[in-house]
Every structure is written in structure tokens, then in C-alpha cells.
Image (spheres, rainbow, N blue to C red):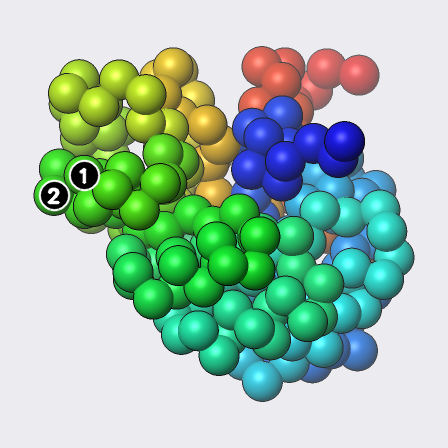
Amino acid sequence: MAQDAIEQLGTHRLVPVLVLDDAARADGLAGALVDGGLPVAEVTFRTAAAEESIRVMAARGDVLVGAGTVVSVDQVERAVAAGARFVVSPGLSRAVVERCHERGIPVLPGAVTATEVQQSLELGVSTVKFFPAGTAGGAPAIAALSAPFGGVRFVPTGGVGPSDLAAYLALPCVHAVGGSWMAPRDLVAAGDWATLRAAVADAVRLVNGRRRDEP
Ligand code: 3PG
């Protein structure tokens, strides 16, 4: 049986949050992620190119592609049809979560308060996106929130960068960390795959606990 997509995110521990302005960049971007050692992509529904970009990346077969910024059931349907393997939502929407369950696609809803975590659990979701992580209290807030919710896993995203990545990953309840820093929109738009591949590789090295200058 195929490993659940959410579990695979935990294997990589990093989720690149991507904004594509042109689906013509999708294949090159996917290649740079793979070459950089991070075959994962959260393609956000913030642009008209998202759906086709997911389709292009999913067709390659070598990248775990999900849809991000999914805020409606229509977007859930479009993400599934395009081949997305997981759905990420900035907040907690019962309609989005329930449609994902109906479609059999794993979903990471946003939750930053005890109430939202409880609501997620009531909907059968125990891995949530902690967004926006930086302004919602960062790693200390997640540590405090995890005390009453022992079985809940968090994917902090929003304002995370190389300087605070380790603090998040040090928490046992942090499943993976999301962010755009390793694949910024302007580099994607420029098709600067060499720079992007290097940034991705740097992020992967940080996760693996290796210094940048090590071979
Ligand atoms: C998201 O949608 O998850 C965030 O906008 C990504 O946040 P970042 O750009 O601060 O990494």
C-alpha cells in the first residue's frame, strides 16, 4: 500500500510552499526540487496557474505534489482532478475537510488555537498546519499547545526561515515545516533553477543537521 502522503511529508520534514505564475515553469521547478533533494511540492491556489502546475508535476511521478491555500470545496475538486496527493488549507474549514475526506485525500487544515485543534480532532484530523507560525507564537506556542493535545502533530508554516527551522524541528510534535524561503516566487518566475536547486539543497542539509560547508 502506498505510504500516506502526510506520512511522507514527515519523512522529508520540509514542505516547499510554491507560487507559480506560469504553469510552463512547473516542470523545471519540479526538476529543481528533485535535484535539490526535496521531491515535495505544495502548489498554492493563489494563482490561476496552480491547477495546471499540479497536473504537470503530478504527471512526472517523482514528486509528492499537494495543493495549498485551498479555501473552497471547488478547489478541493480541482486539486484532486489535477492529481494532488494532499491538500493544505490556511484555516480550518469544515466544508473543505469533509470534502477531502469524501475524496479520500489527506488534508492539513490550519489550526493555531486550542479551539481550532479541538475542532480539527472532531473532524478526524490530528495533523494540522500551524499558520502563520511566526506571528502566532512560533515554537514556544506549539510546545504549549501540544501539552494538552498529545497526539496532535503540527506543520508550522508562515515566516519560517533557516534561522528558526531548527527550533521547530526540535519539537517532537512538529511533523514537518513549511515555507517558501527555499523556492521564492521570483526565482520560480525567472526559471533560475540552479539558484533554486542550491537553496533547496541548503534547506535539506539544515534538516539533516549538516553544516553547509560539509561535502
Ligand atoms: C503559506 O501559505 O504556507 C505561507 O504563506 C508560506 O509562508 P512563508 O512565505 O512565510 O514561508
Residue under the image location 48 percent in, 53 percent down: 101
Amino acid identity at mark 1: Gln
Cβ(mark 1) to ligand 1 < 8 Å? no
User: Which residue position is annotated with label 2?
Assistant: 115
Q: Which of 185 and 57 is in front in this view?
A: 57
Amino acid identity at mark 2: Thr
Q: In which quarter of the image is residue 191?
A: bottom right
Residue under the image location 56 percent in, 73 percent down: 77
Q: Quadrant of residue 143?
A: top left
Q: Please rate how many residues cluster around mark 1, counting C-alpha atoms within 10 Å: few if below 14, some from 14 to 19, many from 20.
A: some
Disc 2 and disc 1 in contact, CB within 8 angstroms? yes
Relative vertical location of residue 30 with respect to residue 48 in this rendering, above or below? above
Q: Which quadrant does the N terminus fall into?
A: top right
| SS assignment at label 2 | helix
Relative vertical location of residue 36 with respect to residue 151 in this rendering, above or below? below
Residue under the image location 58 percent in, 52 percent down: 104
User: Which residue position is annotated with label 1?
Assistant: 118
| SS assignment at label 1 | helix
Q: Where is residue 70 in the image (x, y as percent from the top left)?
A: 45, 67
Q: Which of 140 and 50 is in front in this view?
A: 50
Q: Which quadrant does the C terminus fall into?
A: top right
Residue 136 in view of the camera: no
Relative vertical location of residue 207 with respect to residue 123 in this rendering, above or below? above
Q: Which mark is residue 154?
A: none
User: Does residue 20 appear left or right of residue 181 in this picture?
Assistant: right
- Separation of residues labelled 2 and 1 (CA atoms): 5 Å
Residue found farthest to the right: 60
Q: Where is residue 84 in the image (x, y as percent from the top left)?
A: 66, 59
Question: Ligand 1 shows up in which quadrant of the image?
Answer: bottom left
Relative vertical location of residue 40 with respect to residue 59 in this rendering, above or below? above
Residue under the image location 48 percent in, 79 percent down: 74
